Image (spheres, rainbow, N blue to C red):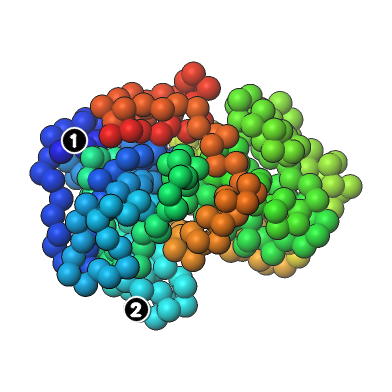
Amino acid sequence: MKANCWHGKHDLRVDTVPDPKILNPRDAIVRITSTAICGSDLHLYNGFVPTMEKGDILGHEFMGEIVDVGSKITNLKIGDRVVVPFPIACGNCFFCQEKLFSVCENSNPNAAMAEKMWGHSPAGIFGYSHLTGGYAGGQAEYARVPYADVGPLKIPDGMPDEDVLFLSDILPTGYMAAENCDIEPGDVVAIWGCGPVGLFAIQSAFLLGAERVIAIDRFPERLDMARGLKAETINYEETAVLDELKSMTGGRGPDACIDAVGMEAHGVGMIAAYDRFKQALKMETDRPTALREALMACRNGGNVSIAGVYGGFVDKIPFGSIMNRSLTIKTGQTHVQRYMQPLLERIQKGEFDSTCMITHRLPLSEAPKGYDMFMKKQDNCVKVVLKP
């Protein structure tokens, strides 16, 4: 089969690789009909996530048709259309029973490696380095899905791929980011990043009762999309974000702040230059510009939700602000399995526009081009969907 494979920083190739096979009785094989490039995939592309190996298949947002199942799979059959969640979860361990699927105890075969870096291991993740299991990803013609009796969600007939594809990651991620804010009617929510996760967080914040959403970015096409979703916007290259947020909220600050950017945040001024310098020298793994602003901007006693991916260590976090101002921080890789069915029902009711951010559709053979375009924000690129 053909698959989009990592060969080094900024070096992706669509290679011919062996077809996946059933390895365990709870496996399924999916013929992929749609897959996407996620913003967090760029962290792999840009070389910021360790333990990648040449030939690793990328991609954790995918869906398709079941073509084979293991002997213990009774809830799926050949021919079913499914969306596959990006975290791999066994369904049986303590954390899965608590619906904390992204920290499953059993799905990361390289747990010891992750424990050395993070203290404890998260779940395995498709196509996201050997730190999270070394699983082959979904930017391919076929994929093996472990614990297929727990993860994949069957899709009703008649629903196009693009209406439901993002149930694999970015829609639940944006929703969980907003849910973590404990939004009450009348709240003001500020969101750093108007990429796909940020756009879904905007929709989710309004659905959960926010009165106002203020979205922060620098790209005109993304800010336009945010305004199209009824958000107010700030271009951080044109104004001082903290001062503007105070002005827009009567000096109090937003009730909740969402960092939907993560480890490769851009910024202006000396602190942004500091992060780039330290990251280039490998003295800091992540650039937390958006996170710092969210922590400083949030009102006293407010909630800060971190949906952007961080991988290692960051500097100059204003922890005194967190403690002295009674901030609550919630974060985590998304427990996608918890949200898929409820969000599918919301899509069917028309409560989410799942296609508004798709700007490019490419064949799988052009995946490297899609990554380069997405990374450089060329041609107003916001979201790329690949068709094997």
Point 67% across, 60% down: residue: 181
Q: Secondary structure at mark 1?
A: strand
* Front position in the image: 249 or 59: 59
In the image, 250: left or right of 286? right
Local packing at callout 2 (Cα closer than 10 Å; few below 14, some 14-19, many 20+) is few
Point 36% across, 53% down: residue: 82
Compared to residue 263, the image places residue 236 above or below, namely: above
In the image, 247: left or right of 156? right
Disc 2 from disc 1: Cα separation: 33 Å
| Residue denoted by label 2 | 92
Q: Secondary structure at mark 2?
A: loop
- Which disc is residue 372 wearing? none
* Front position in the image: 181 or 86: 86
In the image, 113: left or right of 182? left
Local packing at callout 1 (Cα closer than 10 Å; few below 14, some 14-19, many 20+) is some
Point 27% across, 70% down: residue: 74
Q: Position of residue 243 (x, y in %)?
A: 79, 40
Quarter holding the C terminus? Answer: top left
Q: Amino acid at mark 1?
A: Lys
| Residue denoted by label 1 | 2
Query: Toward which corner of the image does residue 197 lie, by quadrant?
Result: top right
In the image, 227: left or right of 104? right
Q: Amino acid at mark 2?
A: Asn
